[in-house]
Image (cartoon, rainbow, N blue to C red):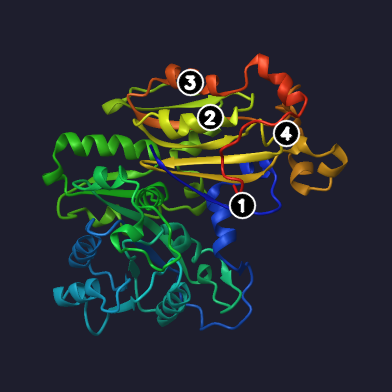
Amino acid sequence: MPRFSGTAAPSVAVADTIMQKNSIQNHKKKTMSLSTKSTTAIEPYPSKKLPVTVLSGFLGAGKTTLLNHLLHNKSGLKVAVIVNDMSEVNIDARLVEEAGVLSRTEEKLVELSNGCICCTLRADLMAEVQRLAAEDRFDYLLIESTGISEPIPVAQTFSYADEASGIDLSRFSYIDTMVTVVDCYNFLRDFGTDALLADRALANSDADERTIVNLLTDQVEFANVIVLNKTDIAGGKTTGLIKALLRKLNPGARFIETTFCRVDPSEILNTQAFDFETAQSAAGWQQELQAAHHTPETEEYGIGSFVFRDPRPFHPQRFWEYLRTDYPSNIIRAKGLFWLASRPQDALNFSQAGGSSRLERAGIWWCSMPFAERMHFPSFRYHQKAIEGRWHPQWGDRMNELVFIGQELDADKISAALRACQLQDTELGQLECRQPFSDPFPETL
């Protein structure tokens, strides 16, 4: 049974708006206070923008090993390096320094310690990147993030101006490649747990309630290059299974299999392959939802996916019991919108990765408000034709649309079980008469 968590959603949101914008954009709104114009003067522009590769990956995956390998094989590039570490003593920076791979006169190593560049040290990251770019003497910047860092906020840092500092990194630097290093030997164990980062004393604060599997998923789904490391000790079968799984989670990524992170630097440096807009919709579940019809592909290692679509509401008691006790253990990733007969106004979001699941309120359905009220929302007016084009005569724009990715999935069996959780014909009268339903879902979704 997956561990469930829930978070409060914005007080004003509309279901179709949530569908038009993805979770990355929502994350951006929650984590940044940014504008598109800088408010203060910055240092002089460099002669050219500084390309950046960001190395992400869970603790022990091999990020520092990869960094040192790239620095040993940088083919004459003058490289600046930023190494982030959560502890007060930056061990990874010491390892890079001791390797003696940076010219002390032409290159530079910057340490950002005792915090994470995706949150508490974000302002420090922006200031350091601005300073390095303004020096106008480096060909490239490599950033090694801490093992618990989320790549999305780091990439966003290079796309917008910060209102507080006035720094706009997009004017003199850009993300060239987003790399995630995967520890093939330990990945399946970590991905299958429902443990929190705090359970392993890895949280960045007392308020950090992230699960390990959700962090791993974030790191994989946003990368455009995924390095499968430790393939020698993981073995060919395990490596193949992980690659098939991750290709489902991120179909557009380039995969590199390696031991000791020995990769061709041209696969990671100056690739000009990363695009923020593309990365926003790179996750496999998003691509499944955007496809009009899913055509089953050859399922390597039994990894497959399907989309469940049916507008009828779920019976809250039956659906809750299914998620709690009967949810298939071979579902690796799931995400999408659904609605309950007990909460006809609310669009609800379900997200599951490995042993961790999250339920949250995504907004309200357009059909839950009068037409005149809908017309007050620019998002409705702009998308009105598309919204009304898929309007159901009985359910309006309400929908259940859930993507499932897993191993040896029986799509027919899972779909039948989900339909059994929905209201049956004999129960529709209870909904029409607004009679109450037993609802064990948390009230604060």
SS at mark 2? helix
In the rendered image, residue 360, in percent from the top left (x then y), is placed at 56, 46
Residue 78's disc number: none
Figure check: 292 above or below 58: above
Q: Is residue 60 left or right of residue 293?
A: left
Residue labelled with disc 4: 387
Instruction: Depth check: give the residue in front, 263 or 412.
Output: 412
Residue labelled with disc 3: 417
Instruction: Depth check: give the residue in front, 355 or 317.
Output: 317
Among all residues in the image, which is located at the extreme left? 233
Q: Earlier in the sequence, mark 1 or mark 2?
A: 1
SS at mark 3? helix
Q: Is residue 402 left or right of residue 117?
A: right
Cβ atoms under marks 1 and 2 closer than 8 Å: no
* Gap between marks 3 and 4 measured at Cα: 29 Å
**Mark 4 or mark 1, whichever is nearer to me:** 1
> Disc 2 marks which amino acid?
Phe
> Disc 1 marks which amino acid?
Ala
Residue labelled with disc 2: 319
Q: Earlier in the sequence, mark 3 or mark 4?
A: 4
Q: Earlier in the sequence, mark 2 or mark 3?
A: 2
In the rendered image, residue 355, in percent from the top left (x then y), is placed at 36, 42
Query: What is the crowding at mark 1: few (fewer than 14 residues within 10 Å), some, or many (at least 20)?
Result: some
> Disc 4 marks which amino acid?
Ile
Q: Earlier in the sequence, mark 4 or mark 1?
A: 1
> Disc 3 marks which amino acid?
Ala
Residue 9's disc number: 1
In the rendered image, residue 342, in percent from the top left (x then y), is placed at 66, 34
SS at mark 1? loop
Cβ atoms under marks 2 and 4 closer than 8 Å: no
